[in-house]
Amino acid sequence: MARYRRTRSVALGDRVFHAALWICAASIPLLLLAIVLELAVTAWPAITRFGWGFLVSTAWDPVTDTYGALPMIVGTAVSSLLALLIAVPLALGVAIFLTEFAPLWMREPIARLVELLAAIPSVVYGLWGIFVLIPLLREYAVPLLQRAFGWTPLFAGTFYGNSMLAAGIILAIMILPYISAVAREVLLAVPNDQREAALAMGATRWEAVWTAVLPYGKAGLMGAVVLGLGRALGETMAVTMVIGNRHEIGLSLLQPGYTMAAAIANEFAEAVTELHLAALFEIGLILFAITVAVNAAARLLVWRVARASAAGSRAL
Amino acid sequence: MNRRFAYLAALAVAAGGCASGEGRVTLTGAGATFPNLIYQQWILDYNAANPGVQINYQSIGSGGGIRQFSDGTVDFGATDAPMTDSAIAAAGGNVIHLPTVLGAVVATYNLPGFQDTLRLTPEALSDIFLGNITRWNDPRIAAHNRGAPLPSTPIVVVHRSDGSGTTYVWTDYLSKVSEEWARRVGRGTSVAWPVGLGAKGNEGVMATVTQTPGAVGYVELGYALANRAPAAAIRNRAGVFVSPTIEAITAAARGAMETMGPGTDFRVSLTDPPGADAYPVASFTWVLVRREQSDSLKARALVEFLWWALTEGQKEAARLGYAPLPESLLPWIAERLAAVNVGGRPVWENPIGRP
């Protein structure tokens, strides 16, 4: 600031540049505010009609104009967590392999291939889910899962194909490239001194990674996971094609479910009554609030971890 | 040289001005996706014959069509589910529903090893979609399909997850034939389904049914025809099992007309009509037009286009998977079109005259 004052008299160009940057910087929060306002205003009839009950009600009946969002909130959470559960170990494994263990000639091509997964359009994942993944699940995976875990409520019931499980797996594949790409950058940013020091102490390569490299990059790796979670929460097309779109909460992963993004995409175009439209907007508002909360929580987490572990967040 | 060029340019401008003065009109419409195919074909053909009229139709869905029509952002709307009385009141009552073509909704199924055409009674159909019948070899289905043995596999119901006029027609039919359906579920562009998987769009339902053994779902006839999908024959009110064909759908409209008069609101539902050769799950799709218009040039162009579509244009219907309107309906439609006016002055002469 002090420096700016000194140069203020020098050039008009600087002042114009200053103002332009201010406008750019201010436009982002203003845009966010505008989105929230628009969502809230359009959702208002539903907010006043259903109150907090909207969040805990499981009814969704456009014929009688009664709406509740709980099945979709739960569905969004379950499908995203399931995706993380599958994708995080895989993505971290890929990133560790590519930075620490793979032969040099192999690293770049494989990293590019994994990143290529992110370039596939969502709807193509959905089609692949319907025509490849679901038949595979039905023929091979689910019978095995049911034999092993059929006694738990998680894998109870009949499997028709479109299900929470299929949605979770599709989402896992979709967020994998994001997590692994960021994780790889984070691991690449870990200074070689860390590895060399651990190896010099007599650690095996695995021990070096586990004790010296991963803790150093902890904050960055968490950032990678949160990036994946954010993407999973909002993913729409592929999920709606395989999740079964049913307003129901079930313990079993083999049952169909629903997500908030899928409900909006499905019903928006034909929402005729004002209340139906308002209910969909309120779901949008909730989804918005959840993603903001997740990102804020993640920031906090990354910040706290970063303070403890020095420079790990540099790659962020 | 220069001067001659300037003359030419002036001439061209004058000619262009004349053309626009003669009535270059741009009409915009929006709404239902189901008739999109034939509307686009009509627009193309009509524009070729009448280059002065530019028409632009966006298939954004029936709900969106009604909304844009009511907001006055489009010159005409299109919908598969008629506007409710309250929606019409909200639009100031200034709406004419005009049927343009007929569509049908068919039950398509995936029964490996079953080669016959599945025959379903209205009771069996509603019980399947209510979840009261859960296996294919249930006697209520098997009794009418004696030719081939039905498997004992569970029935997987597949329905639309997106709001849709197709869903409206399907649930309208089920509400008419099943008291339990009318009470528990009702009719609408999206409803609370008692059982089943939701899939997005006709293509989603079709794909899910194709991929799921034991599945049954509903899609538009044109879609089933294009995919050569099996379609169940449904027993109509006369007690005949009728397969969905173009002729059986026009027959449904003819059957429903028996209960209509020249003044009947065209929002009438065609499902479950009388007539021995009528397929029972048929429906009009409508164009929404304002009776009182403000721009006489536009109003006239719109009415002329619609009249052309309802007469000449009907020849395209069958080829594109739609059923043409019965010709006996034309005089009634002409009368509605002749009612379109600007400040009380009609914009179009009824070519048929009063019926």
Image (cartoon, rainbow, N blue to C red):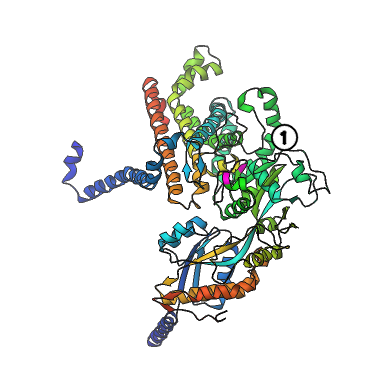
- The residue that label 1 is drawn on is A139
- Which residue is at the far right? B147
Front residue of A90 and A114: A90
Which image quadrant: the N terminus of chain B?
bottom left
Question: Where is residue B225 shown, x and y percent of the image?
Answer: 70, 58
Front residue of A141 and A254: A254
Front residue of B347 and A110: B347
> Looking at the image, can residue B46 be seen?
no
Numbered disc 1: what chain? A
Secondary structure, mark 1, is helix
Question: Where is residue B32 shown, x and y percent of the image?
Answer: 54, 59
Three-letter amino acid code at the position of disc 1 = Glu
Q: Residue at x 40, y 37 (%)?
A: A289
Front residue of B191 and B10: B191
> Vertically, is B180 above or below B333?
above
- Could you classify mark 1 by the number of other residues whose Cα lies within 10 Å: few (under 14), some (14-19), or many (20 or more)? few
> Looking at the image, can residue A206 be seen?
yes
Magenta stretch containing residue A179, yes or no? no
Q: Residue at x 48, y 22 (%)?
A: A214
Magenta-drawn stretch, dominant element (helix, strand or loop): loop
Magenta stretch containing residue B189, yes or no? yes
Question: Where is residue B2 shown, x and y percent of the image?
Answer: 38, 85
Relative placement, left or right, of A144 versus B8 is right
> Vertically, is A304 above or below B28?
above
Which image quadrant: the C terminus of chain B?
bottom right
Question: Where is residue B212 shown, x and y percent of the image?
Answer: 69, 42
Question: How many labels sit on residues?
Answer: 1
Find the magenta span and give its range.
B183-197
Relative placement, left or right, of A85 versus A54 is right
